[in-house]
Image (spheres, helix red, strand yellow):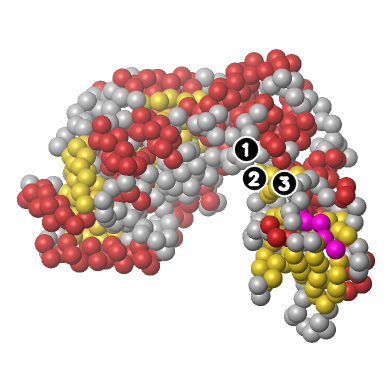
């Protein structure tokens, strides 16, 4: 057995953990001994002070020295056994549920003097300690200070302390995985020593060097593995793509009717360089909502098609796939065969599409997840584009890239403006191009706030826009975590608005079928309806240039970044656009702060930074970012310096396999190694 394997073994191998206890731990997702190490003391319990029985405080853990006076063993079910005790100042009952008489008599012999520690309660006007944590007949027998853990239900403090003490005693001496320069930064404290320090009751919640080292290890493991993935992907030699990047330019610019921004051009150049090189591309295109990523990806697609390859473009939703498809149709030559494939595509069409992809007749396929789940075989796939797939982590991207084959480049697009530490963590396996600049014609979105009682003001605002033939999003958020309530609140709003704008309101909520949703979105896109009431199902990425007003109800339920994303649904055309945040009641300081930030800037990166400061990183994205590894200790805001240090160190070390092996225990422990097993 390798040293670290002890730590990865099941907790039930520990003394004192039988089936029952192990189930309790597993409920809390503590499966291995290593997991157990991160269940941290919340503070300490001091049992050293002895209290007299007339000084007892109910509800507190206290230690007393008493005489054992009398047993009371009622031989009835459900009634506990009692042992009556006293000192010179008062009385106390020790109460035992589920303990045998013989055992009680042994630990509390009549007439003896014992030390007892436990939580003091009051029953029928008498003090009692139920199932005392410690009973000892000699003075030494009680641990003076225990760590206080956030307890798993059904587990006692005593058991927890005993288990963890055992584990800490048995942690193997692991070989140091870091180089000397890093060890020095952390005062040469080893991983093992750090973990032991971490569990000392007096260190609870302390921010010592031991904690920094452990946080660093966690960050280092996450960044190291994505860098290794990147390193290995870059080793893959592919056929260079050959194309003339200028041949289409004028034609496309004419068709889209706007000039590309500098950042768009830069991104296209980055991508072209990758496509033409003999290394496989693995690139993230990041840009705030509305920064114009789609056109960049379509121009790249054209280049790939011109060099003789097929392109596969995956969008997160059907409606978005449809939008991309329509745009591609518009700007591509008629003789380039593009097809749309979604869950809605009819079976016979699907069959034909699959056949034509296999024989290289179709040059570009745009679709949803189904593109990769189905048994689709490409003749000659040269580029995979993944749009707004926040749920994809390193592993999924890697799988997709593999599926495309070695000549297949990969482009991932994301509108989630996140700070660099998080880009490193989530997308560390990729090269990054960022579009910061917004298209020139963009106007700032004016942001207002309103209390719900004054909703009639909002209605009047909406009337003006409707009269100008503009379109409006009206967002009703999830009020409870329940879909039912969600759709009820939006139905009520829909009815209310229909009083004012008959036949001009559409309703979109989570309980509608895909077909129904699509119909309504189409009606909105074709301007058949003016107002679209919806829950947050108006998806990221959708482009409705004619919509220039968005109302967001219960706005305090959303995070800043999410509000920014929602707000970004408007302001895409060249009209004045506005966003009205509606609040239920008077605003908290925090809510006021958020409105101020939103009003003051339209820059998603700034907003996400402020958001992180207000809320911490976990909640930042407003939707569960499962591409983000679960850190137990590290925090991309608070520990920015350690992220930067890890990045620097990883750049320094060579990532070839011989060098890499010393990090394997670290990666195994921090559950990052499984990606390696299928690395080429
Ligand atoms: P996102 O980056 O959020 O995916 P889109 O690609 O959907 O943004 O673009 C948003 C809107 O901006 C679209 O209507 C698109 O036609 C338009 N657009 C893109 N680039 C430019 C540009 N350089 N100048 C003007 N409008 C642009
Ligand atoms: Mg987009």
110 vs 65, left or right, is right
Could you tell me if residue 414 is visible in this image? no
* Residue in the picture at 92% in, 72% down: 102
Q: Quadrant of residue 251?
A: top left
In the picture, the quarter occupied by the N terminus is: top right
Tell which tag, 1 or 3, sits nearer the viewer. 3
* Residue in the picture at 19% in, 32% down: 443
64 is within the stretch colored magenta: yes
Which residue is under mark 3?
46
Comparing 413 with 185, the one in front is 185
- Seen in the picture, residue 364 relative to 431 is either above or below; the reply is below
Q: Quadrant of residue 112?
A: bottom right
Badge 1 crowding class, 10 Å Cα cut-off, few under 14, some 14 to 19, many 20 or more, is: some
Labelled pair 1, 3 in contact (Cβ < 8 Å): no
Q: Magenta stretch: dominant SS?
A: strand
Q: Quadrant of residue 229?
A: top right
Badge 2 crowding class, 10 Å Cα cut-off, few under 14, some 14 to 19, many 20 or more, is: some
- Seen in the picture, residue 592 relative to 188 is either above or below; the reply is below
Which residue is under mark 2?
42
Badge 3 crowding class, 10 Å Cα cut-off, few under 14, some 14 to 19, many 20 or more, is: some
Which residue is under mark 1?
205
What's the magenta region?
63-67
Quarter of the displayed picture in which ligand 2 can be seen: top left
């Amino acid at each position: 057995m390798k040293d670290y394997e002890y730590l990865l073994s099941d907790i039930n191998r520990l003394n004192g953990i039988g089936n029952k206890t192990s189930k309790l731990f597993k409920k809390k997702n503590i499966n291995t001994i290593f997991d157990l190490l991160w269940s941290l003391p919340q503070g300490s319990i001091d049992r050293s002070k002895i209290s007299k029985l007339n000084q007892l405080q109910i509800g507190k853990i206290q230690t007393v020295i008493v005489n054992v006076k009398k047993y009371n063993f009622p031989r009835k079910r459900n009634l506990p056994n009692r042992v009556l005790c006293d000192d010179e100042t008062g009385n106390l009952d020790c109460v035992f549920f589920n303990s045998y008489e013989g055992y009680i008599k042994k630990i509390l012999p009549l007439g003896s003097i014992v030390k007892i520690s436990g939580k003091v309660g009051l029953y029928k006007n008498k003090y009692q300690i139920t199932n005392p944590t410690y009973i000892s007949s000699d003075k030494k027998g009680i641990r003076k200070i225990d760590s206080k853990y956030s307890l798993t239900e059904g587990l006692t403090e005593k058991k927890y302390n005993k288990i963890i003490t055992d584990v800490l005693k048995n942690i193997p001496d692991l070989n140091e995985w870091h180089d000397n320069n890093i060890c020095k930064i952390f005062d040469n404290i080893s991983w093992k020593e750090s973990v032991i320090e971490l569990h000392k009751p007096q260190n609870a919640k302390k921010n010592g060097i031991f904690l920094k080292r452990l946080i660093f290890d966690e960050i280092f493991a996450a960044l190291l593995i994505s860098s290794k993935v990147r390193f290995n992907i870059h080793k893959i030699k592919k056929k260079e793509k050959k194309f003339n990047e200028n041949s289409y330019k004028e034609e496309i610019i004419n068709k889209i009717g706007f000039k590309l921004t500098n950042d768009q051009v830069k991104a296209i150049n980055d991508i072209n360089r990758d496509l033409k090189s003999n290394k496989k591309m693995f690139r993230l295109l990041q840009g705030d909502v509305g920064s114009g990523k789609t056109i960049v990806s379509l121009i790249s697609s054209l280049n790939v098609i011109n060099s003789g390859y097929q392109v596969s473009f995956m969008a997160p939703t059907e409606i978005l796939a449809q939008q991309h498809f329509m745009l591609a149709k518009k700007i591509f030559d008629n003789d380039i065969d593009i097809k749309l494939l979604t869950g809605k595509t009819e079976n016979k069409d699907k069959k034909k599409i699959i056949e034509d992809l296999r024989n290289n007749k179709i040059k570009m396929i745009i679709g949803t997840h189904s593109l990769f789940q189905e048994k689709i075989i490409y003749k000659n796939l040269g580029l995979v584009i993944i749009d707004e797939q926040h749920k994809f982590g390193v592993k999924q991207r890697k799988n997709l890239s593999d599926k495309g084959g070695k000549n297949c480049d990969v482009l991932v697009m994301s509108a989630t403006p996140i700070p660099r530490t998080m880009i490193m963590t989530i997308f560390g396996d990729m090269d990054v191009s960022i579009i910061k600049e917004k298209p020139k014609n963009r106007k700032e979105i004016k942001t207002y706030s309103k209390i719900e009682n004054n909703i009639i003001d909002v209605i009047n605002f909406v009337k003006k826009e409707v009269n100008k033939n503009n379109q409006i999003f009206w967002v009703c958020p999830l009020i409870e975590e329940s879909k039912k309530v969600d759709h009820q609140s939006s139905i009520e709003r829909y009815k209310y608005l229909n009083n004012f704008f008959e036949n001009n309101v559409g309703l979109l909520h989570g309980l509608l079928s895909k077909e129904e949703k699509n119909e309504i979105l189409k009606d909105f896109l074709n301007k058949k309806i003016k107002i679209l009431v919806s829950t947050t199902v108006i998806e990221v990425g959708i482009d409705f240039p004619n919509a220039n007003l968005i109302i967001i109800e219960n706005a305090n339920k959303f995070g800043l970044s999410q509000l920014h994303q929602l707000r970004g649904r408007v302001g895409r055309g060249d009209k004045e656009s506005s966003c009205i945040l509606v609040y239920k009641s008077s605003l908290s300081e925090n809510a006021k702060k958020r409105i101020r930030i939103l009003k003051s800037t339209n820059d998603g990166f700034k907003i996400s930074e402020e958001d992180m400061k207000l809320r911490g990183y976990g909640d930042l994205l407003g939707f569960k970012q499962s591409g983000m590894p679960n850190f137990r200790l590290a925090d991309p805001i608070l520990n920015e310096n350690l992220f930067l240090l890890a990045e620097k160190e990883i750049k320094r070390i060579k990532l070839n396999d011989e060098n890499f092996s010393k990090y394997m225990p670290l990666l195994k422990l921090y559950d990052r190694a499984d990606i390696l097993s299928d690395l080429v």
